[in-house]
Image (cartoon, rainbow, N blue to C red):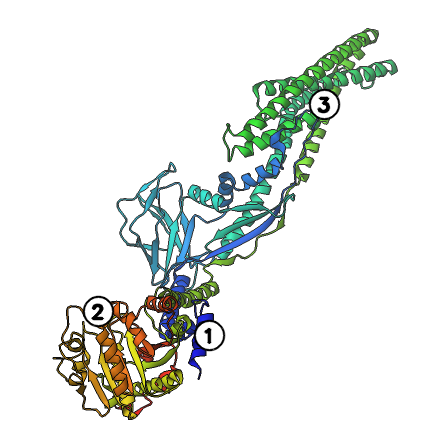
Amino acid sequence: MNFEQIDNDLIQEKNESSFDFKTFVNKLIKFWPWILVSLMIAFSIAFLINKVTDPLYRSSSKFFIKEKESAIALFERPTISDVGSMGLQNEMIILKSKPIALQTLRKLDFDIEYYQAGSFRNTRLYNNSPLLIQAEWDSPQVINGLIEVSWENDSIFTLGFPDEKYQKLLTDGSSVILKNIPESQTYKFNEWINTDNFSLKISKIDIVKEGKTLFVLRDINTLASIYSNNLNVQLVERGASILNLGIVTPNPIMGMVYLNTLMQTYLDQELQEKNEVYANTIEFIDSQVSGVADSLKFFENELENFRSQNRIYNLSTEGAAVFDKMSELETQLNNEQFKRRYYQNLQDYLIRENYKDLVVPSGIGIDDPILNGLIQNLLALQNDKSRMLATMTEMSPAVIEINRKIQDSNNSIQEVLKNVDNNSKLLIEDLQERINQMENSFRSLPETEQNLIRIERRFSLSENLYTYLQEKRAEAAITKASNTVNNKIIEPASFGYLISPRPNQNYIVSFIIGILFPVLFVFLREVFRTKIEDLKYLENRLKVSVLSTILFNRDESNLVVFKQGKSGIAEGFRSLRANLKFVLQRDSNFTLLVTSTISGEGKTFCAINLASVYSLTGKKTVLLGCDMRKPKIFQDFNLQNDKGLSNILSGQIDDWKEVVKKTEFENLDVLLSGPTPPNPAELLFSENFTKLIESLKENYDIVILDTPPIGLVSETIDLLSHVDLTLFVFRQNYSKRAFIDSLNALKKNKKLENLYAIFNGVDVKKSSYGYGYGYGYGYGYYSDDVKK
């Protein structure tokens, strides 16, 4: 193995990403019990959410709104508010308004909410409650709180109030806090319960003999606000006039019922507005018919009496001609007078701005296209304004604009009325003059025939007017009955679908979160970890080769090689010895230096056991304690540190052989550091130290220096020049990751050669990788490990 080449490759290639995916995965695998716990907690939370969350269902429908076309557009001026289908936007606002929601809710029974009690939550019921509850809303009621009904037979039940807070709805529509909550009492089914706080009738409609049901009374005005706010109205497509209505309810049937009822209510209201014109026409005609009918009956009786008394039944030829001509003129006069009365009434309505009772001219037989169009347009504008005021105020821009249009239309109608009224006046005067001329021919007839003609003229006029009015009334009634709405339901609402909670989605999210939190924890722990945990991490970032990994020593003694020769730790040092042979290309006659960044990383432990493995091969080995500040070697060999390196370097002892101490182990000598001097750095820099090293090399095969930590003192760096190879010790979960950068910088700046690393104190149980270099199959494989 060419470790020199390996070292060069490390310098060139170890600038890769700091994130090791394989290491990360291995750590996740070791973390699997916590991942399993996290998943269990996440799934439990999802289960509780699914059980506790009140379900919500969405129902939708499609509704067609026909864009309104003005009955006459000649007198309208386009404005900026007309841009973008303002009419369609108004209809959308009306659909979301509170008044139409209130009309819809009055047709339903949503003001009484039924619930079935459950372990996690109460389930909303609709049309499947075992009880039927009726409330007298003209009396005070207890609202906005659960009321419990429990029964054990078909006759009586107990009414309870389990909530802590209730409100009392008063008869004027206001509500107050109910201070004295009623006590539980027993009542009979199918009988009204009248108290100061509520008025109810509870009927049992299911065959279940015993059970319990909850219900809540709601103020319908509050409900109208809730449903109008919750209704979603959107265009199906841009430019289309089909609306998509949607609402979310706690029961899948309620949304469907509400939307279908809402759309039908809207259509009913539209039809009612369209029929209002014809209803006014019928009412106006009826008011005229009553007087005409009386006159017709009076003249009919008068005609019969005159014929009976005078025994005259038919007119002469001349009299008949006069009668026909005068009847024709008088019919025209009567019709024109009727029209003028209508014009005068219409003028009065316009001045007073009383548009509710307006009658369209065509409804009573007045064929004036311009006037008819203007009045229809005015009525349409007034209807639009009424619907806008359901959701807007008089100061809203849209309402101000439609008021302007109404006033313009009013002014236009009044101008037209002046003209048609003047024309009608002239026509009446002309008819009266022509009738007066006919009177001269009439006087030449016999007196009896003149009287008969007068009576028949009055009767004919009344009969023709009565027939005319009845025809117009029938036409208005037929038109009213045949009226249809312009808008229509395209797609009725169907059974609502569940939107919350979504069990499958919640379980998927809980699975992701259950996995994500442990993964994120491990990732952040790795990102913010400050100490070296894995050999892989050390190898990827260190720009020198790691020659061996040494297992964690669980024994009190540091003499592992001698006392636990068949352990994984001892095998790690043997592997280190073998790798050093390849690095140095020889197995004796060299000097090693063992150091670390700080104290506690195991440099002394490694130096002692490395010296031990060399001594066991028969190599004469000396271990030199250069750490004169914190000497430790003497403790492991049970020696006295009374004299040593400090004595030699300070000149107190000339012959180093007097200081070297034999150990109980063959081929292993130690030169202790001796008493701590006041100037250890200066002593190591002295010429005596250089001579000592040279002399030791001549007398020993292997010289190993245990030096002070390189990160704490400066003299160790200068000792590197005295040795053939330097071993730098890192300890698992003790050495900081920053130490790697320090060693890389030292190698680069000092241009050091033969610098290698040892990974010490490896605990296999806390590692993500198996470790090669050092110990074969790992802790427990060797017999001394098994004994432990």
Q: Are marks 1 and 3 in contact (CB under 8 Å)?
A: no
Pick the residue in front: 667 or 391.
Answer: 667
684 and 436: which is toward the camera? 684
Between disc 1 and disc 2, the foreground one is 2
- Classify 29 as above or below 101: below
Report how far apart the C-alphas of labels 1 and 2 lie in the structure: 35 Å
Q: Is residue 283 left or right of residue 650?
A: right
Q: Residue at x 85, y 16 (%)?
A: 321
Q: Which is more foreground, mark 2 or mark 3?
A: 2
Q: Amino acid at mark 2?
A: Ala
Q: What residue occupies the far right of the structure in this picture? A: 317
Assign a secondary structure to mark 2.
Answer: helix
Q: Going by the image, does 276 lie left or right of 302? A: left
In the image, what residue type sits under mark 3? Leu
Label 1 crowd bin: few (<14), some (14–19), many (20+), radius 10 Å: some
Q: Tell me if residue 442 comes above or below residue 162 in the rendering.
A: above
Q: Secondary structure at mark 1?
A: helix
Image x and y of residue 371, in percent: 70, 23
Q: Position of residue 203 (x, y in %)?
A: 40, 55
Residue 667: numbered disc: none
Observer-side mark, 1 or 3, equals 1
Indicate the quadrant containing the C terminus: top left, top right, bottom left or bottom right: bottom left
Residue where numbered disc 2 is placed = 681
The tag on residue 465 is 3
Can you tell which quarter of the image residue 748 is in? bottom left
Could you tell me how far apart the alpha carbons at marks 1 and 3 are, in whole angstroms? 120 Å
Q: CA distance from mark 2 to mark 3?
A: 137 Å
Residue bearing the label numbered 1:
9
